[in-house]
Image: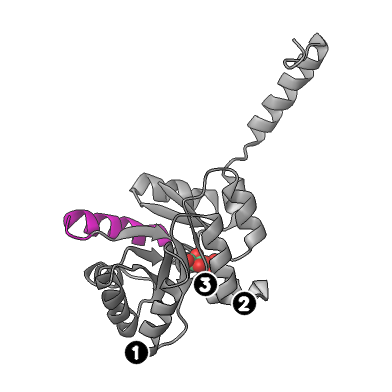
């Protein structure tokens, strides 16, 4: 399973990239707005830190300007993945960009029907938002199960399922059990994955016993 980080905060990305666990990055207009920085500068900088796909989202809503924005974003770096919304204009843009060999992430997917369209439009990734479905009383993971099953029925569909709007480690583990290709994680969720109270407790006990020996590995 690939891990992307869901943030436009370059400091966070730099820090997490050093773990070697990052396969890509996703941003969206809200995340970019939080940084207060120039969007194109942020995208260029992120693309130098992480060499996997870096999703950068268009903001036009009609086909022609959306395509122009997508082409401009794609020209910033080889690893830009243009993010388009799951609308008819977004799907048309997805088809045009993917025919040109540009990676495309179709975002704001909330139904299996929409995911089928994204695959037919040649999307590299489709982003179903699990947390936002949970928020309205639906189980976001049911949608992941449906999409993974449907895509599995059609080997010609090359689109990867990118689980988005992830809120906790359970979302990640369930997505992995279902066979989703990618999860994009807020930095805090990525860090939470490594945590377990028994790990902390066990480590503290080992270190306390080790200190009693008076030894040092590096000084032996
Ligand atoms: C995905 O690409 C989106 O940026 C993101 O996962 C949205 O998550 P949210 O519902 O927490 O805003």
Give whichever of discs 1 and 2 has the lower sequence position. Answer: 2
Q: Position of residue 125 (x, y in %)?
A: 35, 63
**Residue tagged by mark 1?**
64
Up-down relation of residue 88 to residue 37 (above or below): below
Up-down relation of residue 44 to residue 49 (above or below): below
Q: Position of residue 131 (x, y in %)?
A: 49, 64
Give the distance between the C-alpha atoms of the residues marked 1 and 2, in whole angstroms: 23 Å
| Residue for point 33% across, 70% down | 111
Q: Position of residue 108 (x, y in %)?
A: 42, 73
**Residue tagged by mark 2?**
38
Q: Range of the magenta residues? A: 139-157
Q: Which callout, 2 or 3, points to the residue nearer the camera?
A: 2
Give whichever of discs 2 and 3 has the lower sequence position. Answer: 3
Task: Please tell me how crowded label 3 is: few (under 14), some (14-19), or many (20+) other residues with Cα within 10 Å.
Answer: some
Task: Please tell me how crowded label 1 is: few (under 14), some (14-19), or many (20+) other residues with Cα within 10 Å.
Answer: few
* Secondary-structure class at tag 3: loop
Give the colour scheme of this rendering. one colour
Q: Position of residue 190 (x, y in %)?
A: 57, 50
Give whichever of discs 3 and 1 has the lower sequence position. Answer: 3
Mark 2 vs ligand 1: CB under 8 Å?
Answer: no
The answer to which quarter of the image holds residue 40 is bottom right
Q: Magenta: predominant secondary structure element?
A: helix
Up-down relation of residue 77 to residue 210 (above or below): below
| Residue for point 39% across, 84% down | 68
Number of marks in the image?
3
Q: Is residue 125 shown left or right of residue 195?
A: left
* Secondary-structure class at tag 2: loop
**Residue tagged by mark 3?**
28
Is residue 191 visible to us here?
A: yes
Q: Is residue 88 shown left or right of residue 52?
A: left
């Amino acid at each position: 399973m690939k891990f992307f980080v869901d943030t436009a905060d370059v400091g966070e990305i730099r820090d997490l990239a050093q773990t070697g666990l990052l396969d890509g990055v996703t941003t969206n207009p809200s995340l970019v707005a939080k940084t207060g920085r120039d969007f194109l500068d942020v995208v260029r900088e992120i693309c130098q830190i992480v060499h996997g796909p870096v999703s950068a989202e268009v903001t036009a809503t009609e086909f022609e300007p959306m395509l122009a924005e997508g082409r401009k974003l794609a020209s910033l770096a080889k690893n830009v993945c243009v993010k388009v919304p799951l609308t008819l204009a977004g799907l048309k843009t997805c088809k045009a960009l993917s025919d040109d060999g540009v990676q495309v992430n179709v975002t704001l997917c909330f139904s299996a029907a929409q995911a089928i369209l994204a695959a037919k439009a040649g999307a590299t990734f489709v982003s179903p938002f699990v947390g936002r479905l949970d928020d309205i009383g639906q189980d976001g993971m049911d949608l992941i199960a449906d999409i993974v099953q449907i895509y599995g029925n059609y080997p010609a569909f090359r689109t990867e399922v990118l689980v988005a709007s992830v809120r906790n480690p359970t979302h990640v583990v369930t997505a992995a059990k279902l066979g989703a290709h990618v999860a994009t994680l807020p930095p805090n969720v990525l860090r939470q994955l490594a945590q377990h109270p028994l790990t902390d407790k066990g480590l503290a006990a080992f270190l306390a016993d080790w200190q009693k020996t008076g030894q040092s590995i590096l000084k032996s």
